[in-house]
Amino acid sequence: MAIAKNTICIWYDKDAEAAANFYAKTFPNSSVGAVHRAPSDFPSGKAGDALVANFTVAGIPCIGLNGGPMFKHSEAFSFQIATDNQEETDRYWNAIVGNGGKESDCGWCKDKWGISWQITPRTLTEAMAAGGDEAKRVFEAMMTMQKIDVAAIDKARAG
């Protein structure tokens, strides 16, 4: 297997393999590749524990590194998943939140490993790109939401 020139490396405490498996079953064009086991004990694990999990999330190559608890995730890094309708928005949101995650505002949520996700309907992105009054109305509607309500965004777009 060829090694990608650029890969996102995500630091996990100890659950990179579990996270990779969850992402692979949740998002299309996602999979788990090689899982490399530690050849000897290391500060946060034992020989034979998963050390690195190679995976793809919606076509983006990633490496999950089980490095221990010293570095925490923040909203400074997130995956943004574009959705086509409310059903798709609900499916991803509910998968993340329903698997031990947490809701946040404006289409953001966190999975149980602390990774932030933006579940963003395309209609929201299109309205913001349009600018002007349409973007202002949509932005103000979005600011009242946790999971994005596609019908409310479309209503705001129309004025």
Image (cartoon, rainbow, N blue to C red):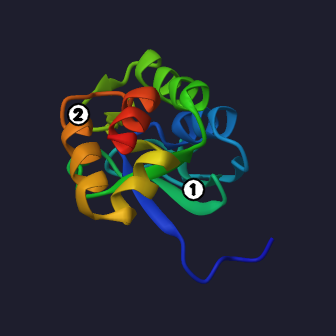
Which quadrant: the N terminus? bottom right
Q: Secondary structure at mark 2?
A: loop
**Looking at this rendering, what residue extends furthest in the front direction?**
159
Per the model, the C-alpha gap separating discs 2 and 1 is 42 Å
Q: Which amino acid type corresponds to the residue marked 1 in the rendered image?
A: Pro
> From the viewer's perspective, is 50 left or right of 148?
right
Residue 59 in which image quadrant:
bottom right
- Residue 111 badge: none
Relative vertical location of residue 78 with respect to residue 148 in this rendering, above or below: below
> Would you say residue 104 is visible in this rendering?
yes
Could you say where residue 89 lies in the image, as x and y percent from the top left? 52, 31
- Residue 39 badge: 1
Residue ID at (60%, 62%)? 60
Q: Which amino acid type corresponds to the residue marked 2 in the rendered image?
A: Asp
Residue ID at (69%, 76%)? 3
Could you say where residue 137 lies in the image, as x and y percent from the top left? 24, 45
Q: Secondary structure at mark 1?
A: loop
Badge 2 density bin: few <14, some 14–19, many ≥20, Cα 10 Å: some
Which quadrant: the C terminus? top left
Mark found first going from the N terminus, 2 or 1? 1
121 or 64: which is nearer to us?
121
> Would you say residue 72 is visible in this rendering?
no
* Residue corresponding to mark 2: 105
> From the viewer's perspective, is 26 left or right of 139?
right
